[in-house]
Structures are given as structure tokens and as C-alpha cells.
Amino acid sequence: MLGALMFCSKILMEALPNIHLLGMLVMVYTLTFRLKALIPIYVYVFLNGLYAGFNLWWFPYLYIWTILWGITMILPKKMPKAVACIIYPLVCALHGLAFGALYAPAQALMFHLNFNQMIAWIVAGLPFDVIHAVGNIFLGMLILPLAELLKKLSRQIGII
């Protein structure tokens, strides 16, 4: 269900360029479910490929969301709320800003780009990555309250 929620949220927000709930949801799921958060992340990745086609664009999704999951996993578990309110949106925003650079190595391999062409590809996509980062920083403000809510609900029904 959580992976389907990620997928549906992406489809509903496609009219907005690079603004979506995905980074925020990846972090919320990771803070709540830790290792098990990979399940909804990869359900989302699979649904995305099923919907839009398992084409070359899809392969970087196999690692891009895992990078955000991994960064979230190494953040301190007992971070003070005042610090978490700053760090979580910042991490989410930095992932959005880095999205093109994270995607670029796969693009370079698939389309036989040399290093200079890969850098040009990153630079050309930078305006979209900035939009991505701005959207992620604002949506990232929801990470802490939603993670706390999801933890509480998950405890009540015995998931965690």
C-alpha cells in the first residue's frame, strides 16, 4: 500500500515539474520502518516501470531512491526534534538537487556519453534539479510529523 501511495502521488502531481512527494515519503518510510522501507520503495519503482514502461530511463530508479534511503538510514536515530526539523528537509532537498547528477552516470553508460557530455547533461538539467530541491525542502518539512504519526499508527496495529 505504501509503494502504491508513492506511485499514485507521483501520477497525481505530474503536472508540476519535478515536484512530488517521493523524497519525503522515502524518508518517512525509512525513519519508520528502517530496512523494511526498501519494500515500498521498490514496489514504487516496479509500479513506475509497469506504468511507463521498463525502458532505459527506468534503470537509474533502481539506485536513486536507495541512495536517499541509505542517507536517511545513517542519520542518528535519536536526533533532537529541533535538529531533525532542519536536517530532514535539507537532506530531502539535497537529494532533489543531486537527482540529475545521480542519474547522469547511468545516462552516460547507456548513451555512450563521455565525461564532458555527461557534465553538459547535468548542467542542462540543473534548473529542473533546483525546482526539485525547492519542492523537496518544503515537502521535507512534513517528514518529522508524518514519521512520528506513522510510527504511532504502526505501533497501534502491531507492525513495529
Image: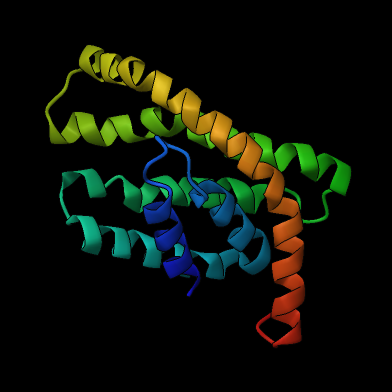
Residue plotted at (22% across, 43% down) = 57
- Image quarter of the C terminus: bottom right
User: Hey, which residue is sitting farthest left in the picture?
Assistant: 112
Residue plotted at (63% across, 58% down) = 28
Question: Is residue 74 visible in this depiction of the protein?
Answer: yes
> Could you say where residue 143 lies in the image, as x and y percent from the top left?
68, 51
Q: Nearer the viewer, residue 138 or 63?
A: 138
> Colour scheme in the image?
rainbow
Depicted 47 relative to depicted 101: above or below: below
Would you say 113 lies left or right of 9 here? left
Residue plotted at (15% across, 50% down) = 55
Q: Nearer the viewer, residue 130 or 87?
A: 130
User: Hey, which residue is sitting farthest bottom in the picture?
Assistant: 158
Depicted 70 relative to depicted 103: above or below: below
> Could you say where residue 41 lies in the image, as x and y percent from the top left?
45, 61
> Could you say where residue 38 lies in the image, as x and y percent from the top left?
48, 64
> Could you say where residue 117 lies in the image, as x and y percent from the top left?
21, 15
Depicted 3 relative to depicted 22: above or below: below
**Count of numbered circles on the image:** 0
Residue plotted at (21% across, 28% down) = 108
Residue 32 falls in which quadrant of the image?
A: bottom right
Question: Is residue 80 visible in this depiction of the protein?
Answer: no
Depicted 140 relative to depicted 41: above or below: above
